[in-house]
Amino acid sequence: MSQEKLAEALGITFQQVQKYEKGLNRISAGRLREIADTLGREVTWFFEEMPTYEAYPTLSKADLRMLRNLKALTPETRRAVDALLSSLSGSGEAAK
């Protein structure tokens, strides 16, 4: 479903859907339910691939939060962040 069609079905603007997708605006539980219903999914569908602290006990909750935020970025932006972190850490092992 396109962002335009989702916005129309929810009665909001296309720009608001983009803000949700980019993580610029938070989604309330009620709105998340509306989105799930519109897409014909259960709310839990949105969380199926999210890492949990229990699944990665060696990572801190802050590490997992950072991973979730990185996953939301475009591949191009992720590569730039990886290069920055690599240069700051001195490892020189940025992804190509």
Image: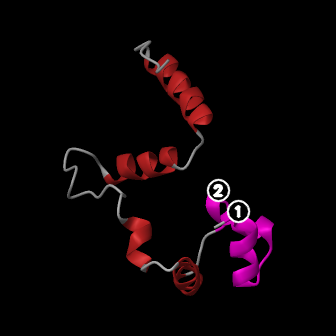
Q: Position of residue 81 (x, y in %)?
A: 56, 31
Q: Position of residue 22 (x, y in %)?
A: 64, 56
SS of the residue under disc 2: helix
Magenta-colored segment: predominant secondary structure: helix
The kind of residue tagged 2 is: Lys
Seen at 63% across and 61% down, the residue is 21
Tell me if residue 14 comes above or below residue 57 in the rendering: below
Left or right: 64, with 34 as reference point: left
Q: Which mark is residue 52?
A: none
Q: Report which quarter residue 1 is drawn in.
A: bottom right
Tell me if residue 34 comes above or below residue 91 in the rendering: below
The kind of residue tagged 1 is: Lys
Query: What residue did someone put label 2 on?
Result: 22
| The magenta segment | 2-25
Tell me if residue 74 comes above or below residue 38 in the rendering: above
Seen at 40% across and 14% down, the residue is 91
Task: Tell me if residue 39 is in the magenta stretch.
Answer: no
Q: Position of residue 94 (x, y in %)?
A: 47, 19
Other residues around mark 1 within 10 Å, as few (<14) / some (14–19) / many (≥20): some
SS of the residue under disc 1: helix
Seen at 56% across and 87% down, the residue is 30
Distance in Å between CA atoms under marks 2 and 1: 5 Å
Q: How is the image coloured?
A: secondary structure
Cβ atoms at labels 2 and 1 below 8 Å apart: yes
Seen at 80% across and 74% down, the residue is 13
Instruction: Name the one closer to the observer, 87 or 70.
Output: 70
Other residues around mark 2 within 10 Å, as few (<14) / some (14–19) / many (≥20): some
Query: What residue did someone put label 1 on?
Result: 19
